[in-house]
Image (tube, rainbow, N blue to C red):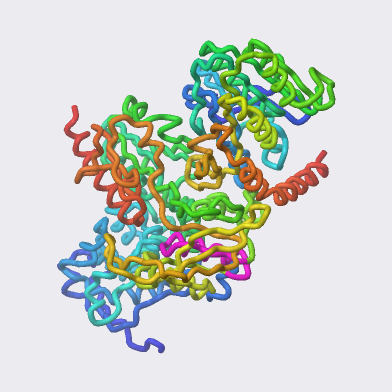
Amino acid sequence: METYTITDQEQLSPTVKKHVIYMPLIAAKAKAGQFVILRAHEMGERVPITLYDWDAKTGTISIIVQSIGKSTTMFNELKKGGKFLNVAGPLGTPVEIKKYGTAVCVGGGVGIAEVYPIAKALREAGNKVISILGARNSDLLILESEMGTVSDKVLTTTDDGSRGEKGLVTGALEKLHASGEKLDAVFVIGPIIMMKVVADQTKPWGVKTFASLNPIMVDGTGMCGGCRVEVGGEARFACVEGPMFDAHLVNFQNLMARTAAYRDREKACMADHKCRLDAIH
Amino acid sequence: MTITAPLRIVYGTKLKNTMEPTTTAKKYIPNPQLPRQRGSRQAPDERATNFNEVAQGLSAEEAAREATRCLNCKNPPCTAACPVNIKIPEFIACLRDGDAGGAVSKIMETSLLPAICGRVCPQENHCEGACVLGKKFKPVAIGLLERYAADTARKAGKLKAPATAPETGKKAAVVGSGPSSVSAAAELRRAGHKVTVYEALHDFGGVLRYGIPTFRLPREIISQEIANVKAMGVDFVADVLIGSTLTIEDLLKAYDAVYIGSGAGLPTMPGIPGENLVGVCSANEFLTRINLMHAYKPEADTPLNVGKKVVVLGGGNSAMDAARCAKRLGPESVTLAYRRSRDEMPARAEEVENAEEEGVKMEFLLAPVEFIGDEKSNLKKIKFQRMALGEPDASGRRKPVPVAGSEFEMDCDTAIIAIGQRPNPIIQKTTGGLSTGRHGVIVVDDSGKTSLDKVYSGGDSIRGGATVLLAMKDGKRAAAAINKFLAEKK
């Protein structure tokens, strides 16, 4: 087996795909909360994606990719047996896994894939894990059963009520807190706005909350500083010092602005890619 | 001025033995009065709009003429001043005979990166600065001759990988693929050891690849010189971040020795308000997007935002590279602001001149105090404070001192910070027992050995931001020490 080979794939939703890639060095070292940087072609971007799972025995890692822009769409166009051009990692600082007591893992959208390994590791460390999953609708909800295998309890919410409770993850979290359950730590991964709202919600409760940040990166090894985030008033590099930070100290407003810096170009690039695809299909 | 003087070279018997100092000394009569050749260059207006190489190098005729200026000194000060002691008069003698292949083989006895060094080495501080001709005339254009030799030999297919000693069965790992690592790898391989180079990024060359722009050092030159080291039998592995994918401890289990040449990849930020605004970036980010990711090409997926008013902060070579790259992307203005005066600028004089010719505006004695943004966190202005020069500091340069009440604002939508780099701390943090010094540099002894047995280091990881040639020198020094201890090891 050659490295970079996609050994297996699974379509999780119309735009979300799981890729299993043969990368034995990464599989041997990976820890919850770390990510890899991938490229699909010579002129491609270096795209950071959090590791979903890994298996040192088979030498494989798994990532879950949502087609959002051109690069992620091209990733999902790769076929089983095909190869990524580059996969580097594991990158970033692992999440601190210890016995907190009751840990809540909140995942929104494709963020569920990122919170999965954290829930798994927390459970293995003896925590009671309650997972709260959120998606726009049941079609876009991924990994509900997998999350069940690594959680003591799973609370599912959808914006339209097509699966689980109608509403947002914050509603489920509010109820959980109101139920008198003692919460010792919250891990939240999803859209920035969701992470911000959860952080605002847990702050008055005094519950330690961690958010995995997704700023723009180029190299992912601490070289470019493009991923600077403001945490506790200081600039930190998410690629090496993160991506997980104390959510109560993160300047989410600044993260939102910096993440949007290339949005117009992304849209134009994607439109061009789609237009060419349409010509083929 | 046209050159009418005949070339006063008296060649030895049919070019063959001219490299023998005894014969050349007798028969070769140099002509140092000839004007120093500069080679052709793209005109400033033209080059400021493209990323093609600025300096075009010497023609065969120009190279032959320049080669006759060399005095062929018996104890050449140029060789002594070269950090890797290239046998300069000897390679120039080959060029006089039209033997570029011989010239490059001579260079490669001590330097594996001739086409790169010929382009980016600050020759004025080394070989050319020491050239005897410089006292009365202009020094021999050694850099251009080195480049000519390498380019000509490569185009003619005469670039041969240096011979290697019989296999020793010993193994060495090299961390990083920049100039110090490549030099170390080549010297270790030359001694017959099995060598593996681990690079964290997807392409090889380190700072040559991500830092130096293609108009100063074309990408294919880097690839070709790396290919030459590969041809010696050195294995190059991409996408492996040492300290994470594999640790130094892992390497020590599989290899007999390790060389760390992981460079100084961590950008220094000024630590002033507003540096997280959209539009403020490090020179590393700006240059990596352009040089490694090709963001200036329409077919590249990595984007790059360049606004209308670009301000580069800093006065070193990275600052010049960033300013010159920015200029090529067509903003209304590119201003370089440096906190000391022109005389204290660490950049090569040639690069400063190139930048000014291309339309980069230089502002001196200005220190940024704040980045000012709009309600959407987009950079709009930089607040500067004027500086005056005070007493010399630790670097021997006069220290900038703030002038009270001199603050003013400058319009700016893209600020590129080029105020220095430090070693990336990943290896230092993950390697127990590895001693580090100020700014996280790895501490080594006179042989390049770190505090750990079998682990050596050099280049920017021990210096914190220096030159290609000093990095190569460190790589060679450590390789020599490793070769010595591996030879003693049974």
Closer-to-camera residue (B138/B10): B138
Quadrant of the snapshot with the N terminus of chain B? bottom left
How many numbered discs, if any? 0
Left or right, A157 with respect to B355, comes to: right
Q: Is residue B86 above or below residue A108?
A: below
Quadrant of the snapshot with the C terminus of chain B? top left
Quarter of the figure with residue B72: bottom left
Q: Is residue B378 located in the magenta-colored stretch of the structure? A: no
x, y percent for residue A236: 50, 42
Q: Is residue B364 above or below residue B158?
A: below
Closer-to-camera residue (B223/B372): B372
The residue that appears at 73% across and 21% down in the rendered structure is: A172
**Viewer can see residue A280:** yes
Closer-to-camera residue (B314/B84): B314
Quarter of the figure with residue B344: bottom left
x, y percent for residue B136: 24, 82
x, y percent for residue A255: 62, 43
Span highlighted in magenta in the image: B309-333
The residue that appears at 40% across and 59% down in the rendered structure is: B115
The residue that appears at 28% across and 31% down in the rendered structure is: B433
Residue occupying the far front of the picture: A204
**Viewer can see residue A63:** no
Q: Is residue B320 located in the magenta-colored stretch of the structure? A: yes
The residue that appears at 34% across and 31% down in the rendered structure is: B431
x, y percent for residue B248: 35, 31
Closer-to-camera residue (B187/B65): B187
Left or right, A258 with respect to B357, comes to: right
